[in-house]
Amino acid sequence: MYSPKQLKIARTVVLAVWIFAAASFFFPLYYTDFGGVGRTLFGLLIAVHLIEFPIFMNTYRETEGSLLSHFPKHMAYGVVYHAEVKQKLNQP
């Protein structure tokens, strides 16, 4: 079980990585070596989250809401969002 503080820190880190990866498509990062790393990271994040979603789909089906409502949250936060959902399911 993760504390709310740990989950908030994890969400912040993941969001910062997404912002860096998305910013690497624009000037001035686009023309730097960091831009290449960021664009690669962006593609990897998309690919990994698309692979993870069907794997975690059963957990999302057990909770309230449709899969369509879980999909964007999972694409943004991945395993961090899955950990939050799983933690809510295990609460008495």
Image (cartoon, grey):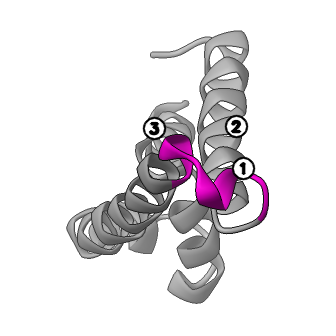
Do residues under tags 1 and 2 come within 8 Å of each other at their CB atoms? yes
Specify the principal SS of the magenta part. Answer: helix
The local crowd at label 3, few if under 14, some if 14 to 19, many if 20 or more residues have their Cα within 10 Å, is some
Residue under label 3: 83
Q: Could you give the CA–CA distance between mark 2 and mark 3, rounded to whole angstroms?
A: 19 Å
Residue 54, above or below 2: below
Do residues under tags 1 and 3 come within 8 Å of each other at their CB atoms? no
Residue under label 2: 16
Residue 25 colored in magenta in the image? no
Q: Could you give the CA–CA distance between mark 1 and mark 2, rounded to whole angstroms?
A: 5 Å
Front one among 48 and 34? 34
Secondary structure at badge 3 equals: helix
Residue 15: % across, % down: 69, 43
Secondary structure at badge 2 equals: helix
Q: Which residues are magenta?
A: 27-35
Badge 3 amino acid: Ala
The local crowd at label 2, few if under 14, some if 14 to 19, many if 20 or more residues have their Cα within 10 Å, is few
Residue at coordinates 72% horizontally, 12% vertically from top-left? 5
The local crowd at label 1, few if under 14, some if 14 to 19, many if 20 or more residues have their Cα within 10 Å, is few
Drawn side of residue 27 relative to residue 89, left or right: right
- Location of residue 27 by image quarter: bottom right
Residue 31, above or below 83: below
Residue at coordinates 45% horizontally, 55% vertically from top-left? 36
